[in-house]
Image (cartoon, rainbow, N blue to C red):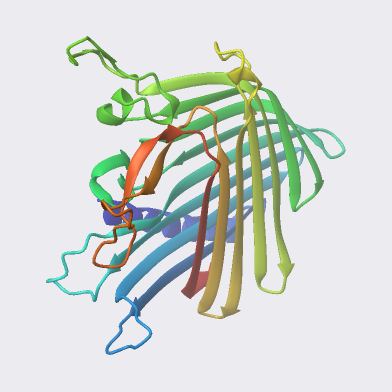
Amino acid sequence: MAKLLLISSLFIVNIFTINAQTTTAAKDTSWKSTGYFSLNANQAIFSNWAAGGYDAFAASALVKYKAYYEKGNVLWKNDFVFAYGVLRNGIIKKSNKNPWRKNDDRINIVSDYAYKARNKFYYAGLASFRTQFAPGYANNNFKMKVSDFMAPAFLQIALGFKWTPEKYFSLFLSPATGKYTFVNDQTLADAGSFGVEKAVYDVNGVKIKDGKKFRPEFGASLMAKFDKEVAKNVNWTSTLNLFNNYTDADKDNAKNIDVSWENSITFKLSKFLGASVFHQLLYDDNILVPLYENLKDAQGVVIQDQFGNRLKVQSGMGKRLQQRFIFGVGFSYNF
């Protein structure tokens, strides 16, 4: 299903690109669009290797598309990011029973519309949507699903003011922002995943009320964005998003700020060879993450699986700064 969604997304993006370019060339130069596509794969194979190592295969695809409209007092920017990657221990063949592991999974769409108020200041509205393509599973436990398509999904709608001192930098401030969290999986909703209200059970453990699949929040937000070719064939995009839910019933929690900071750098090494680096910092006081500790035997020795990975057991849930770092090299194409 995830592969089908990714292929469909690539097809739609390319059709939209061709259409936009054709329209731009024939009628209106107010629209400008750029895109980046990369496909990375690698296979590691060891045979009688004294230093040790494990056969592994990894593959990933990334599509970034930007469509900007600027005419008169109107500035409308649209950004799309689709990414999906997998890895698997062992040589790729039918007899390989090792599970595929997800190492990248992103659907990010941001659209902001601005009308010039004065000089570099605009009245603006912004909408952003984030989710993923495929299910995600707990660490070393491929039967325990912890996420899925639209579980979670985050929709943010904001009205406010935008400042653009340079074409490559903008600052958006909104005193009126709606943030909506969706967990479209009843099992995850019942567990209260991603901050939604969990299910209610009686003393016998029988569920008497389903967990909610939707969590609305209202507050203030700030988004700072930097997007520039910082060197020849090197583009850096950095987006900082802050949100404060000042309507939270928990007054202590209402003081906390949700933070999402994404940095993406793409390198064009040659016409069809490129590299990309992605790093994200995420903190949300309402999202509890699983906490793990090493599984040990009776003698206190850490237990490992056949691939040398340390086996871990969940010790609880807690608030943590979440991070992910993704690097890829392979085929790339700018359009």
Give the farthest residue toward the front: 299
Front residue of this view, candidates 185 and 145: 145
Horizontal side, residue 197 vs residue 229: left or right: left
- Name the foreground residue: 30 vs 241: 241
Relative depth, front residue between 169 and 256: 256
Quadrant (top left, top right, bottom left, bottom right) of the C terminus: bottom right
The residue positioned 50% from the left and 79% from the top of the image is 272
Residue that appears at 36% across and 30% down: 183
- Does residue 180 appear left or right of residue 152 in this picture? right
Number of disc labels: 0
Give the quadrant of residue 263: bottom right
- Residue at 49% over, 74% down: 329
Q: Is residue 94 above or below residue 136?
A: below
Relative to 205, say whether 299 is above or below.
Answer: below
Q: In the rendering, at what x and y percent does residue 240 appear?
A: 66, 43
Residue 112 falls in image quadrant: top right
Q: Where residue 61 sits: x, y (%)? A: 41, 63
Task: Tell me residue 75's x, y (percent).
Answer: 70, 41
Q: Is residue 184 depicted above or below 234 in this figure?
A: above
- In percent of the image, x 45 and y 28: which residue is there? 181
Q: Determine which quarter of the picture holds residue 201.
A: top left
Horizontal and vertical percent position of residue 299: 29, 54
In the picture, measured across the screen, residue 114 lies left or right of residue 288, that is: right
Farthest residue, direction right? 119
